[in-house]
Image (cartoon, rainbow, N blue to C red):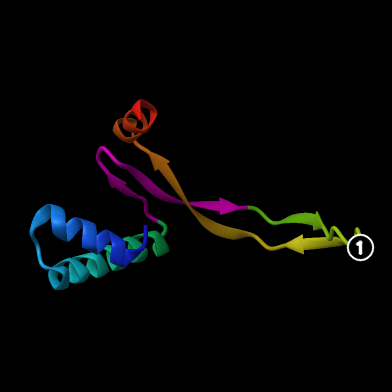
Amino acid sequence: MTKSQWIEKTAKQSGISKKDLNAAYDALYNALEETLIAGESVQITGFGTFAVREKAAYTARNPKTGEPVEIAASRRVVFLPGKTLKDKINEA
């Protein structure tokens, strides 16, 4: 689902204007982004948790040449679904 599809669907369900939903979407996205950049997690009750995890550096292999390639350490965003969301998905 794209941003425009989400706004369209939510506008139909809620009766809120697309302009207001677009502003709310952007505000939510910016708040999530700022919180995750700061290394904090975001928990949405009933939906799940967005968290930042550290991935250590490691050595991989180039599949064509077999040469070792160093992969730098990085931070990654992970999503952990909440129980309510898991249950709804498994019912479907």
Report the magenta stretch's main SS: strand
Instruction: Name the residue furthest left.
Output: 15
Residue 90 place in picture, x, y as percent: 39, 28
**Residue for point 38% across, 39% down:** 81
On screen, 91 above or below 59?
above
Instruction: Please say whether residue 45 is one of the residues in the magenta stretch.
Output: yes
**Residue for point 26% across, 37% down:** 46
Q: Which residue is mark 1?
A: 65
Residue 57 place in picture, x, y as percent: 69, 56
For the C terminus, give its image quadrant: top left
Of the residues shown, which amino acid type is indicated by label 1?
Thr
Q: Which residues are magenta?
A: 40-55
Residue 71 place in picture, x, y as percent: 72, 61
**For this rendering, which residue is in front, 13 or 81?**
13
**Residue for point 21% across, 70% down:** 22
Give the tally of numbered discs.
1
Residue 7 place in picture, x, y as percent: 23, 63
**For this rendering, which residue is in front, 44 or 1?**
1
Q: How many other residues sit within 10 Å of disc 1, few (<14), some (14-19) or many (≥20)?
A: few
Q: Secondary structure at mark 1?
A: loop
**Residue for point 91% across, 58% down:** 66
Give the side of residue 56 with respect to residue 86, left or right.
right
On screen, 5 above or below 56?
below
Write down the quadrant of residue 18 in the picture.
Answer: bottom left
Give the side of residue 65 with respect to residue 32, left or right.
right
Instruction: Please say whether residue 78 is one of the residues in the magenta stretch.
Output: no
On screen, 70 above or below 50?
below
For the N terminus, give its image quadrant: bottom left
Give the side of residue 66 with respect to residue 45, left or right.
right
